[in-house]
Image (cartoon, rainbow, N blue to C red):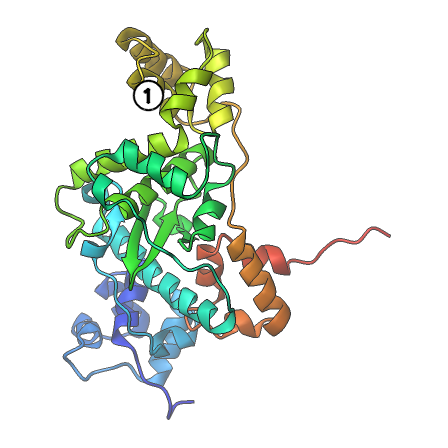
Amino acid sequence: MKSSFEFNKRRLKIAKDLKGKTNKDLANILSCTEVTISNYLNEKKTSVPDFEKVVILSESLRLPFSFFNSTFETQVIDEQIFFRSYRRIKARYRNSARAYSEFAIQTLEYFDKKISNLPIFQGFDIDTLVNEPEKAALTLRGDWQLGVLPIKNIIALLESHGIAVFRLPMEVKEVDAFSFYHDGQPIIFLNTAKSAERMRFDAAHELGHLVLHSDDKNVLENMKDKEHEADRFASSFLMPKEAFVAMAPNNLNLPNLISYKKYWKVSLAAMNYNLHTNRLLTDWLYRSNCIEFSKLGYNKSEPDPIEREKPILLNKIIKVLLEKEGRSFYENIDFGFQILDDITFNLISENTKPKLRLL
């Protein structure tokens, strides 16, 4: 094993970001100088840790040995990724999110080798509507034959159209959600630390970026405008205006608002905002509702919450691979079981946990 080992410097940088370590931390782990660590990280330098030091890194950082021996070379850069609230996210968390993006790409490539007939992304035929988010959302609803009723499971919907959906692990919960394209494949990451309603809106918001901003060379330019456009797309995609207005209750008191937001599977805040946007609430009533929701704690805890949605296609893929290959399915992934399970909504854990039998 020693003779075949080739240290991957980029993976050391990724490990450092994932675990929130400094060069000094790594130097303490390996009992060496920070200059030595800098040389290990510098791809222009030939210096690499020996086999024993990599074993120590693996054990201390709780990452598989194979993590540092990876031959996977794909890199994702910030200019590719639609981050929500980019400037508020600390560099460490952006770096971690980029790392998880690369793990997702590696996972998809692995799935493609093992499973045939997976849905293929066909693109969006909405080029003329990129400056009209609401119309783009309604056009896509039509293209996907969704009608005007609430979307049952937006994650499953995205999967069925070839859009890959992954989960952000808890250590990067400061990142709301993000999306990007890799070789024409759209990928979305969602934060399950948020409410089910807000996660649905995030999914629609990221879909908006993929639809409206796919031709952008640098997604970081004019981010404020792009974020607003993606929000408008998400509102229209989840709550199409014609049906939303026609079905709104005459009496918009709090119980009716909660009932109506649950019907559309959106947050109370999103419901309130959309009612105001569509002139079903006056400015005064809209602001009064915002104050009331805050007092009742509804900004932090959604009233009468919906059930959290999970991927359906991803779950099927994992079940098939577990049946065909058992443990070797996830042991063959060089970044390890824990990361793979985290980004796949803990579906591997769910499908491998012992089932209780009634005697």
Secondary element at tag 1: helix
Residue 145 lies, with reference to residue 74, above or below; the image says: above
As shown in the figure, which amino acid type bears the numbered disc 1? Tyr
Residue beneath the point at 13% across and 41% down: 222
Q: Position of residue 15 (x, y in %)?
A: 32, 65
Q: Position of residue 125 (x, y in %)?
A: 30, 48
Residue 298 lies, with reference to residue 57, above or below; the image says: above
Q: Position of residue 240 (x, y in %)?
A: 38, 28
Residue beneath the point at 33% across and 8% down: 285
The crowd level at tag 1 (other Cα within 10 Å; few <14, some 14-19, many 20+) is some
User: Can residue 259 be spotted in the picture?
Assistant: yes
Residue beneath the point at 22% across and 56% down: 80
Tell which residue pokes out farthest to the bottom in this image: 3
Tell which residue pokes out farthest to the right in this image: 359
- The answer to which of 130 and 342 lies nearer the viewer is 130
- Quadrant of image for the N terminus: bottom left
> In the rendered image, which residue does mark 1 sit on?
273
Is residue 161 toward the left or the right of residue 227 in the image? right
Q: Which corner quadrant of the image does residue 28 belong to? A: bottom left
Q: Position of residue 217 (x, y in %)?
A: 15, 55
- The answer to which of 274 and 295 lies nearer the viewer is 274
